[in-house]
Amino acid sequence: MMTVPSAFARTIRELHGETGDEWLRRLPDLLADCALRWSLTILPPFEPLTYNYVAPAIREDSAEVVLKVGVPNPELLTEIEALQRFDGQGIVQLLDADPELGILLLERLKPGAPLSKLTDDEQATSIAVQVMRQLWRPAPPEHPFPTVAKWAAGLERLRRRFGGGTGPLPGEWVETAENLFGELIGSMAEPVLLHGDLHHENILSAERQPWLALDPKGVVGEPAYEVGALLRNPIPGLLAQSHPECTLARRVDQLAEELGLERARLVGWGLAQAVLSAWWNVEDHGHGWEWGIACAEVLARLR
């Protein structure tokens, strides 16, 4: 009988409530249906599982693939759409999908080591830049993706939830983020389709290309927005350093030079997104906001 890890089940229930509970009960049948549909031998899942059930599998033709199954939700739908539009350029290839059931069949990336395993931060940053350049493409006039403005509006939900206050988040940092989002969104360059969560754990070593991204959110905004996730990761390693501001200062300078973007905008987006990510942790889990605020404090010293 299939056993679902307790931490994974708890996360699914936190995020999706009764819908998540029902999905967990149906998960064994969903996996069995996938095995029949694509002639798969499904292996034990990658650990730790977070927001989706992700497992390696072997097709009947001996090809190694990855099966990703999640509770159907808008974010999973835009991930599928983003993978279709990126079409394997700088990112894992989507082999097939069932959006209604929240199922993705993906190319397996091997050896699959995350970018965080590189000890040379300058080299890791250059690799991330190369991936970004392959991914970015003009945003179509009509599309299903959220915009960075819509994401920034998450801070409005924070204010509503706490009656105009900021709950556990320090008010001065929320206000700083709100002001930065307003300034940066009001002066954005031409929008492109972005990955939206391009941090070190979402770039893996591969065979088809040396490094490929995975798990795109799919969001539309200016290129400078993309670096935000890279500037607050890897966690906890970044904040465990004795002088994280030195690492981030060098990283920002390198990103600005290699991408041809304004340093001030990179820092501004990074700071605002760090606060927003802190709120998302409160919204989704009720805890875990501290590291986002800590990253914002470090980035503020670079302004």
Image (spheres, rainbow, N blue to C red):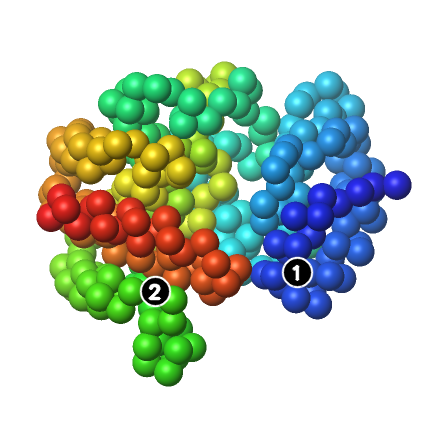
The residue that disc 2 covers is 169
Instruction: Give the CA distance from mark 1 to mark 2.
Output: 24 Å
In the figure, residue 57 lies in which quadrant?
Answer: top right
In this rendering, the answer to whether 72 lies above or below 263 is below
Q: Residue at x 32, y 77 (%)?
A: 165
Q: Is residue 137 visible?
A: no
In the figure, residue 252 lies in which quadrant?
Answer: top left
Q: Residue at x 30, y 19 (%)?
A: 120
In this rendering, the answer to whether 165 lies above or below 62 is below
The N terminus lies in quadrant = top right
What is the three-letter code of the residue carrying label 1? Arg
The residue that disc 1 covers is 13
Towards the viewer: 81 or 198: 198
What is the three-letter code of the residue carrying label 2? Leu
| Residue 123, image x, y percentages | 28, 20
Disc 2 secondary structure class: loop
Q: Residue at x 66, y 66 (%)?
A: 17
Towards the viewer: 96 or 182: 182
Towards the viewer: 78 or 51: 51
